Image (cartoon, rainbow, N blue to C red):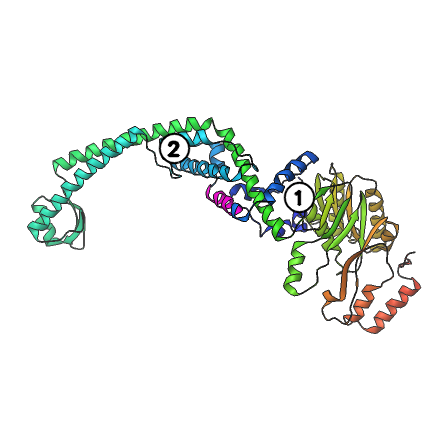
């Protein structure tokens, strides 16, 4: 699986795409599964050759395409399980009708299979409109006969009704009616009506059919049965014919899904000012944006700091204070890579990446009775045992145990991962991990301690390199009200490099 549920939630891909939803069930199924469409360079070039044409479409054409997509419905169940009843064929006809309309709008961009022959067959037995109405010659003749007999029955019942009204000086609402006991007895005595039911000194009566009406009703029943038999015959004929088109219909369903998702990509590209991702050996982001945080900043009046990063195979270490944006950076990288593999433009000025078989976030926390440490280690083992090139996002590995052993485990993990073909983004607070890493970025530095809002105190610009002497935590602790006596002692420990016997400032 390219993207497991833990990683999917972590990179917030569903939230990123929530404003760009498809209109068909086929498109919604793509969003549910989120399978990659870019798995090799051939698929990349074919995909973007098409999508470049899509992105140039006029908005009015896009709206027309979207309207047809919203109208065609879904025949996935019928294609897999067979077309039987009128409802199934009504769905099929609507699908074919709007697919042909789509073909006229999408020529030169998407390859929709030709359903003209199927439409001709359906239209001959139904109509030229999108509605489904059986109209073979036999059925039309039977319907005419049915209407004629029904008309005769109606006329004779109307005559009987008028005769009763005239003789008894009453007005009847219809063939069935309710009356008082006295009138009911009189009508029954004249043999003009029959009892439907009787209650509370009232009769519910029906006009009694004459022999002619009875005979006409029997004829009507025969015609109804003949119509039913003929409809079943036509539906069987339709079913046999449609079976020859099942493979073509499956191709149409795939094309419809592609068109629907391409329109989502169209809106995503234009509304978020995206770029076309490129394939490269390194993972390079220039002015990349994580959409949920961008939206949060715009809503709350914060400055958003775009991401600029250049990572090669192996481990890229991210360090800095809490609130510095390390986890958000992991989410940014993960979401951009996922979007690229799903065939979407990416919200960056430029973006390039290798093609990955998997994207994984190393989760930690309690699960099924495991401690946080046990879960963290088992998750790590599971990720590194997954075969295939991966993007791995690791957040503070080794932090769920004591810091001395945790730092040793983090160092060992970085050394191991640097020998793999994977790309790993590894956040940490451990000084030795930062000191020994070759590709390091600092996340977050103090900007303005006079600000009341913590988010405005920090500059979230990424800086490449090792800057271990900032002591951001003690500065922020003092700003947030920690007693000065505690802060001063902490600062003395730092100056003496006496915390756990480690040199926190590095070289």
What is the magenta range?
62-72
Q: Do residues under tags 1 and 2 come within 8 Å of each other at their CB atoms?
A: no
Left or right of 274, for residue 402: right
Main SS of the magenta part reads: helix
Image x and y of residue 355, in percent: 72, 39
Image x and y of residue 194, in percent: 14, 44
Q: Nearer the viewer, residue 276 or 143?
A: 276
Image x and y of residue 413, in percent: 82, 46
> How many badges with numbers are in the image?
2
Under circle 1, the secondary element is loop
- Report the residue marked by disc 1: 4
- Report the residue marked by disc 2: 123
Residue 225 appears in the rendering? no
Q: Residues within 10 Å of mark 2 (few under 14, many from 20)?
A: many
Is 67 in the magenta?
A: yes
Q: Which callout, 1 or 2, points to the residue nearer the camera?
A: 2
Is 368 in the magenta?
A: no
Q: Residues within 10 Å of mark 1 (few under 14, many from 20)?
A: few
């Amino acid at each position: 699986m390219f993207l497991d549920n833990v990683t999917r939630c972590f990179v917030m891909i569903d939230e990123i795409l929530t404003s760009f939803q498809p209109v068909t069930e086929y498109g919604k199924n793509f969003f549910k599964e989120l399978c990659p469409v870019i798995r090799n360079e051939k698929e990349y070039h074919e995909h973007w050759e098409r999508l470049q044409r899509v992105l140039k479409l006029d908005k009015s054409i896009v709206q027309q395409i979207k309207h047809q997509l919203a109208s065609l419905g879904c025949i996935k169940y019928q294609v897999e399980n067979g077309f039987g009843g009128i409802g199934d064929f009504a769905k099929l006809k609507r699908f074919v009708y709007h697919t042909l309309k789509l073909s006229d709008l999408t020529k030169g961009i998407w390859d929709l299979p030709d359903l003209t022959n199927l439409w001709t067959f359906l239209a001959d037995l139904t109509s030229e409109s999108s509605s489904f109405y059986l109209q073979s010659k036999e059925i039309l003749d039977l319907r005419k006969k049915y209407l004629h007999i029904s008309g005769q029955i109606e006329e004779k019942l109307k005559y009987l009704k008028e005769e009763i009204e005239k003789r008894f000086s009453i007005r009847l609402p219809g063939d069935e009616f309710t009356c008082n006991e006295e009138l009911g007895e009189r009508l029954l005595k004249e043999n003009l009506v029959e009892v439907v039911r009787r209650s509370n000194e009232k009769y519910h009566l029906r006009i009694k059919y004459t022999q002619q009406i009875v005979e006409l009703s029997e004829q009507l029943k025969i015609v109804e049965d003949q119509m039913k038999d003929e409809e079943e015959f036509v539906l069987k004929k339709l079913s046999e014919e449609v079976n020859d088109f099942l493979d073509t219909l499956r191709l149409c369903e795939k094309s419809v899904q592609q068109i629907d998702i391409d329109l989502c990509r169209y809106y995503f590209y234009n509304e978020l000012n995206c770029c076309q991702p490129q394939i490269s050996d390194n993972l390079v982001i220039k002015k990349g944006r994580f959409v949920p945080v961008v939206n949060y900043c715009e809503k709350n009046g914060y400055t958003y700091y775009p991401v600029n990063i250049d990572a090669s195979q192996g481990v890229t270490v991210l360090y800095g204070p809490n609130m510095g944006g390390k986890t958000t950076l992991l989410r940014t990288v993960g979401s951009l890579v996922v979007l690229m593999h799903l065939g979407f433009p990416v919200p960056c000025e430029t973006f390039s990446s290798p093609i990955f078989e998997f994207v994984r976030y190393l989760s930690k926390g309690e699960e099924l009775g495991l401690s946080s440490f046990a879960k963290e280690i088992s998750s790590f083992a599971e990720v590194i045992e997954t075969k295939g090139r991966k993007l791995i996002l690791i957040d503070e590995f080794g932090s769920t145990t004591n810091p001395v052993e945790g730092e040793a485990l983090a160092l060992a993990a970085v050394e191991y991962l640097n020998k793999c073909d994977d790309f790993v983004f590894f956040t940490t607070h451990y000084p030795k991990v930062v000191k020994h890493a070759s590709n390091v970025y600092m996340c977050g530095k103090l900007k303005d301690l006079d600000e009341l809002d913590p988010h405005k105190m920090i500059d979230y610009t990424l800086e490449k390199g090792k800057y271990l002497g900032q002591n951001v935590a003690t500065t922020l602790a003092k700003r947030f009200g920690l007693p000065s006596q505690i802060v001063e002692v902490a600062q003395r420990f730092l100056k003496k490099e006496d915390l756990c016997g480690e040199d926190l400032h590095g070289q």
